[in-house]
Image (cartoon, rainbow, N blue to C red):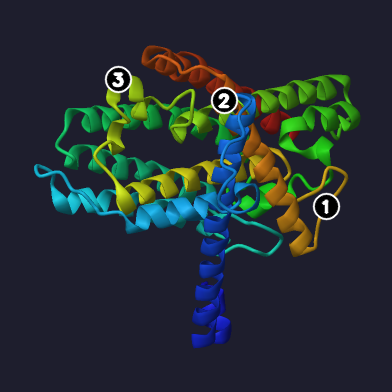
Amino acid sequence: MQGLVADFGPWGVLWGTLQILGVMVMLLLTLAFILLFDRKVWAAVQMRKGPNVVGPFGLFQSFADFLKFVFKEIVIPAGANKTVFILAPLLTLVLAFVAWAVVPIAPGWVISDMNVGILYILAMSSLGVYGIIMGGWASNSKYPFLGSLRSAAQMVSYEVSIGFVLITVLLLVGSLNLTTIVNHQQAGIWDWHAFSFLGNAINGTEDGSLFGRLFGVVVGLIMFAMLIIFFISALAETNRPPFDLPEAESELVAGYQVEYSSTPYLLFMIGEYLNIVLMCAMIAILFLGGWHLPWGAVEDPFLGFLVLYIKIWLVFFMFAMVKAIVPRYRYDQLMRLGWKIFLPTSLAAVAVIGGYVAYFGR
């Protein structure tokens, strides 16, 4: 954005604004159809049809739901703090959108290609918990408040393991820039971080030693394990089943958003699904080569965007399948998984990969 202003003056501001609006419209349209896809996958697993009335094959169902929420009356509980009650979903929505500012969606297509993009995304995702806490507290009800406390504990717990997984990627790449991370995987599927054990088995290290090759394969397998940890932690970070305990209807009557209806509830849901799609994009960028094809690099922006978009949908399909087939965890199981399994495992992975990079210089 600063470069556009420096190069084109006021027209640069206009062009940058149009870029931001374009990304927002694309994300909202993606949410409409990815929500329908989520419901269709869940229905197919349960041998149901899912939404199929509004539009051909139910394609307009999400738009009908949007209109329904918009035209409903906004009900605010009598004992609620009205200002905070309204600000909470707005904060959740804004922070979910702002996080996309540094996500590259194709070669050269990014709103802000900052060198500390990973830190920026971590900061925005960490702030997202405030919207949920504010919504639970402002409702002046014990069920939303307990749900918001659960969400705070859950998100903090799994952000730790996500942070260590990110460090393993940063050690291998040597940069916090997301575009650099994608281009580091441009050689092909054997160079993607999730499957780098293939490339390490074939190419080995620069010194050609058997030890270096074996160590490289071990590091590649560790990175595949980091993909699994990141995927599961992303489910917990975004309150997706089987980790949807902050909104567990069996004991919390839908949790932190139980007192919300109409447009404020819609804003919470949009923010939640924006974070889910962001996590799908991060998995594709960090571990699955971003916009690069399995057999080589992609330079064309339109093809790159299409490739990354397909990868995001494939990762979301895995999110949807987990929601459909995995039973909900108990809260103590959730905390045990995050602190006793993921944290020490990811910390050990950082130590091993740090040693590999320090010794072999790659």
Q: Secondary structure at mark 1?
A: loop
Residue 324 shows which numbered tag? Answer: 2
Q: Looking at the rendering, which quadrant does residue 256 occupy?
A: top left
Q: Secondary structure at mark 3?
A: helix
Q: Determine whether 231 is above or below 85 in the image.
A: above
Three-letter amino acid code at disc 1?
Ala
Nearest the viewer among 119 and 313 is 313
Nearest the viewer among 52 and 349 is 52
Q: Determine whether 322 is above or below 258 in the image.
A: above
Q: Label 2 crowding class (10 Å Cα cut-off): few <14, some 14-19, many 20+?
A: some
**The C terminus, quarter of image:** top right
Q: Position of residue 156 (x, y in %)?
A: 38, 31
Q: Determine whether 335 is above or below 134 in the image.
A: above
Nearest the viewer among 108 and 334 is 334
State which tag comes first along the sequence, 1 or 2. 1
Mark 2–mark 3 Cα distance, whole angstroms, equals 20 Å
Q: Nearer the viewer, mark 1 or mark 2?
A: 2
State which tag comes first along the sequence, 1 or 3. 3
Residue visible at 79% across and 48% down?
186
Mark 1–mark 2 Cα distance, whole angstroms, equals 35 Å
Whether residue 1 sits left or right of residue 93 in the image: it is: right
Residue under label 1 = 297
Residue 245 shows which numbered tag? Answer: none
Three-letter amino acid code at disc 3?
Glu
Q: Position of residue 85 (x, y in %)?
A: 21, 48
Residue that sits furthest to the front in the current view: 53
State which tag comes first along the sequence, 2 or 3. 3
Three-letter amino acid code at disc 2?
Ala
Q: Is residue 99 visible?
A: no
Q: Secondary structure at mark 2?
A: helix
Residue 251 shows which numbered tag? Answer: 3
